[in-house]
Amino acid sequence: MATVPVDLTVDARGLNCPMPIVRTAQAVKGLAAGQTVEVIATDPGSVKDFAAWSKTTGNEIVEQTADGGEFHFVLRKK
Amino acid sequence: MDEPLNLVLFSGTDDKLQAAAVLAAGAAALGKPVNIFLQYWALDAFTRAKIDDDHGLAPEAGVEGRAAVDDLAKAGQVSWAETLRQAKELGSVDIQACSLSMDLLHLEPEDLDPLVDGTEGVTAFYLNAGEGQVVFI
């Protein structure tokens, strides 16, 4: 699990593309700048998708791990 | 990312509508505006009477494709209509009915699901499309 403090967790396990990103983007809308969201996903496309989403939106990936088909991200709102 | 993504939806089968909804939601998550123009059988699928129906799949799906799509649905895949609802909550997603197709299908504005924002002609569609890509599905 996350090694940095998180303000919110999005459990996107079992959700297909693009729902992990959609749920995360919805969650981030409700956060203040600098707050963090933890996302757990099983969609194999999510690694590249979160990288692209981070690059485009400026919300930083501060932690990223993969474990047994689960992908785990911590993102900080810009 | 300021130029919109412009999707022209022609086909009314669930697989093509799902593919379109995924493109729209992805763009909305990136903050890219999305314009969706509904023509022919896609517009028919967006009517109140039919939006929750089974709209079948494209011919190339075959029996195996049908089974694969059913498996994803059983595993909890969100429907194309719900994907579009969430995309609209998330970003700027404008869905317009093609006025020619409204005439073709004898539809009135009240026949359309609330996902549809209005009716316009092709000229208005191109004006709103700006310099963005136009994708026909």
Image (cartoon, rainbow, N blue to C red):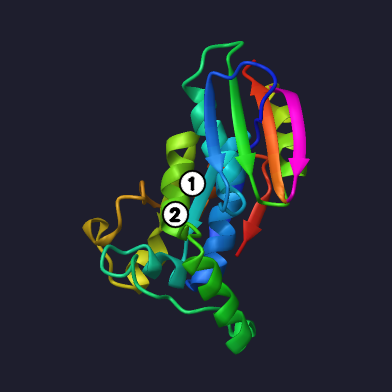
A71 relative to A60, above or below? below
Residue A55 visible, this angle: no
Helix, strand or loop for disc 2: loop
Q: Amino acid at mark 1?
A: Ala
Quarter of the figure with the C terminus of chain A: top right
Left or right? Give the position of B15 relative to B54.
right
In the shown orientation, is residue A31 left or right of residue B120? right
Left or right of B130, for residue B96: left
Measuring 74% from the left and 25% from the top, which residue is drawn there? A63
**x and y percent of residue B1 in the render?**
68, 32
Give the residue number, with chain letter if any, for mark 1. Answer: B124
Furthest-bottom residue in this view? B63
Does B39 sit above or below residue A2? below
Residue furthest to the left: B110
10 Å neighbourhood of mark 2: few (<14), some, or many (≥20)? some
What segment carries the magenta color?
Answer: A60-68
- The residue that label 2 is drawn on is B121
Marked residue chain, label 2? B
- State the residue in front, B114 or A8: A8
Instruction: Indicate whether residue A67 is drawn in magenta.
Output: yes
Is there a contact, CB below 8 Å, between mark 2 and mark 1? yes
Location of residue B137 with respect to B22 vertically, above or below: below
Q: Secondary structure at mark 1?
A: helix
Taking the magenta stretch, the answer to whether it contains residue B109 is: no
The rendered magenta stretch, by its main secondary structure, is classed as strand
The x, y position of residue A19, in whole percent, is: 55, 47
Q: Residue at x 62, y 16 (%)?
A: A5
Q: Nearer the viewer, residue B89 or B47?
A: B89
Q: Residue at x 44, y 41 (%)?
A: B88
